[in-house]
Amino acid sequence: MKKLKYQIDVNATAETAYRAMLGLDDKKTYEQWTAEFNPTSTYEGSWDKGSKILFVGTDKDGKRGGMIAEIAENIPNKFVSIRHYGMLDGDKEITEGPEVEKWAGGLENYSFEENNGITTVTVEVDADNEFADYFDTTWPKAFEKLREIVEK
């Protein structure tokens, strides 16, 4: 796995960026920026530390799929760490086997640093090498969408 890092400055407080990114006030804000990865992207579960959370979408055939994760840390308005440990295939949760082993234990870490009303949002993500190019293209688009949402 490779560690990838993406960053964007938004003209908003850390609290505003954090709440919009996680969809805490309205899940649609989360779904809007993550639509860059999958137009049907959403989550099921809680952002509370220690909680299980599912990142879900449907494929072109309408089949449900996604990632199973645990919120490893959540310090409001500052830091969120997501530890991936499984895949969702329809309603079946897969937590072992060759497909899962490639990235299980991988982290997605989000930090929010505010300075004079400008917040730098950073994500560091562990990615399988085959997804690096996809992430290099998609994360910047997702962050631009997040900026649009946060600066409204």
Image (tube, helix red, strand yellow):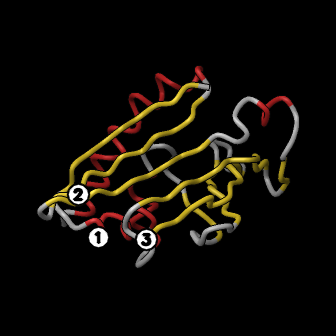
Dividing the image into 4 quarters, which one contains the N terminus? top right
Q: Amino acid at mark 2?
A: Thr
Q: Determine the CA span between mark 1 and mark 2.
A: 9 Å
Dividing the image into 4 quarters, which one contains the C terminus? bottom left
Count every numbered label the image shows and give the total: 3
Q: Residues within 10 Å of mark 2 (few under 14, many from 20)?
A: many
What residue is shown at x 45% (from left), y 74% (from top)? 24
Q: Which residue is mark 1?
A: 16
Q: Secondary structure at mark 2?
A: strand
Q: Give left or right: position of 131 versus 62.
A: left
Q: Which residue is mark 3?
A: 76
Q: Which quarter of the picture shows residue 115? A: bottom left
Residue 119 is tagged as: 2
Q: Give left or right: position of 47 versus 93.
A: left
Q: Residues within 10 Å of mark 3 (few under 14, many from 20)?
A: some
Mark 1 or mark 2, earlier in chain = 1
